[in-house]
Image (cartoon, rainbow, N blue to C red):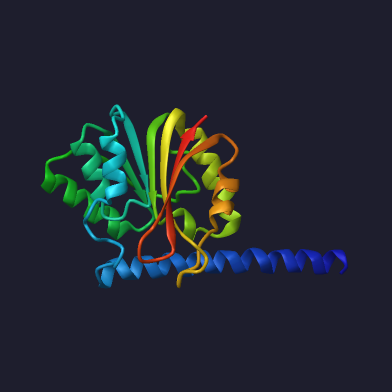
Amino acid sequence: MNSDERICHCSLFTAHYSLLTLMRRLFFALTYWFSKPRWDTNITPPELISLIASGLKPGRALDLGCGTGTNVIYLTQHGWQTTGVDFVGKAIETAKHKAKAAGVAADFFQGDVTRLDFLSPSFDLVLDIGCFHSLPANRRPAYIAGLRRLLGPGGHFLCYAFKPEGPMGGLEVNEMLSLFSDGFTNLKIEHGEGMPSAWYTFIRK
């Protein structure tokens, strides 16, 4: 393969991933506009409730891929100063309305979870329920770098991710542990029920 062919190949590879990202975003946006997303249950998962009940001192919390803000509202009601980020504008709009109706003050931003330069450290808790596992592989390093910057030492990262054998694909447990090995200590893994998945609790070193 000559240099021109290599350049062409790399350009096509980059375009391929850009197209996949665009298609993914379009899917989520259309889902929020024209139906009720099946993942948006309006129920805070017991894994998060258990973590908060374990004695974590309320501080700053960040929900990546926050959807319509159910867990942002829950955390704020339990004393946390909470921020939610999602790339779907309709989801953020709904989240703001829900927070206002619940009488809580929280921050919501429409943004890319792999480009979080607009947020200032440090957070004491970062939550990700089904966002990281849907990122293209080439965007995962940027996500992790942003997480390392934003999560303070001793802070908790609670992440829910599908496994590859599920209908939506996902990440192996060992792959997740490897991806977050630099700067994080794995505290606990709980395997999900129903769909092949797992809950990961990491501590920032």
Q: Give percent across and percent down for residue 17.
A: 59, 65
Q: Examine the rendered structure and indicate whether residue 108 appears above or below residue 23.
A: above
User: Measuring 21% from the left and 44% from the top, which residue is drawn there?
Assistant: 73
Q: Nearer the viewer, residue 194 or 28?
A: 194
Q: Give percent across and percent down for residue 42.
A: 21, 57
Q: Give percent across and percent down for residue 184.
A: 53, 36
Q: Give percent across and percent down for residue 36.
A: 24, 68
In screen coordinates, is 76 left or right of 64? Answer: left
Asked if residue 172 shows in the view, the reply is: yes
User: Measuring 17% from the left and 51% from the top, which residue is drawn there?
Assistant: 98
Quadrant location of the N terminus? Answer: bottom right
Asked if residue 120 shows in the view, the reply is: no
Which of the 4 image quarters holds residue 193? Answer: bottom left
Q: Examine the rendered structure and indicate whether residue 101 appears above or below residue 27.
A: above
Q: Examine the rendered structure and indicate whether residue 58 appears above or below residue 43.
A: above
User: Measuring 33% from the left and 31% from the top, which residue is drawn there?
Assistant: 60
In screen coordinates, is 20 left or right of 60? Answer: right
